[in-house]
Image (tube, rainbow, N blue to C red):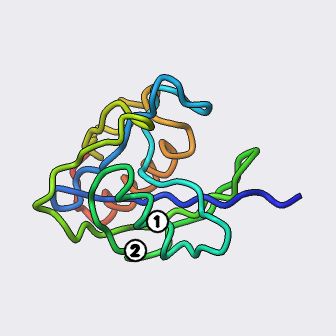
């Protein structure tokens, strides 16, 4: 049986020095109370290009467009496609869906390594890679 597909969006903020993460609800089946990228399941017949903006809006009330593909990872249940996204409604504040998330936070990439226990493992590893890339490009200090 093939795995379900999911999509996640990396939204860098504050001139690419921060990243938006959502805190999963205490009732989440996977990683309760941990932060992750906005996103969710791709519905049957839906493409990533349709699913990610829909999921992003459902979870944050923000409208986004996909900028670039980042990676794919697998877990027991899903094949997860991760994309960089651009916020096309910067004037709209983030409003989390309380059925799925309890909070949001813009984590500073410079200090992301200090938040390992608060973030899902796959997302934490992606953030370390992004931090290293931005550091190499000298877009962040540490």
**In which quadrant is the C terminus drawn?**
top left
Task: Provide residue 102's location: percent of width, then percent of height.
Answer: 35, 30
Task: Provide residue 117's location: percent of width, then percent of height.
Answer: 46, 25
* In this view, 68 is above or below 124: below
Q: Quadrant of residue 21?
A: top left
Residue at x 27% of width, y 59% of height:
62
Q: Are marks 1 and 2 in contact (CB under 8 Å)?
A: yes
Residue at x 31% of width, y 68% of height:
64
Q: Is residue 9 left or right of residue 111?
A: right
Q: Is residue 49 left or right of residue 90?
A: right
Residue at disc 2, secondary structure: strand
> Along the line of sight, which residue is nearer the eye, 98 or 21?
98
Residue at x 24% of width, y 45% of height:
95
Q: Residue furthest right?
A: 1
Residue at disc 1, secondary structure: helix
Q: Is residue 47 left or right of residue 114?
A: right
Which residue is identified by label 2? 66
Which residue is identified by label 1? 52
Neighbor class of circle 1 (other Cα within 10 Å; few <14, some 14-19, many 20+) is many
Neighbor class of circle 2 (other Cα within 10 Å; few <14, some 14-19, many 20+) is some
* In this view, 71 is above or below 21: below
């Amino acid at each position: 049986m093939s795995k379900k597909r999911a999509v996640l969006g990396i939204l860098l903020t504050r001139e690419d020095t921060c990243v938006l993460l959502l805190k999963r609800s205490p009732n989440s089946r996977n990683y309760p109370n941990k932060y992750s990228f906005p996103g969710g399941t791709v519905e049957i017949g839906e493409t990533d290009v349709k699913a990610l903006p829909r999921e992003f809006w459902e979870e944050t009330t923000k409208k986004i467009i996909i900028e670039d593909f980042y990676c794919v990872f697998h877990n027991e249940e899903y094949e997860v496609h991760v994309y960089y996204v651009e916020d096309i409604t910067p004037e709209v504040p983030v409003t989390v869906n309380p059925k799925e998330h309890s909070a949001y936070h813009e984590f500073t990439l410079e200090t992301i390594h200090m938040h390992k226990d608060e973030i899902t493992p796959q997302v934490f590893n992606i953030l370390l890679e992004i931090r290293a890339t931005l550091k190499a490009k000298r877009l962040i200090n540490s």
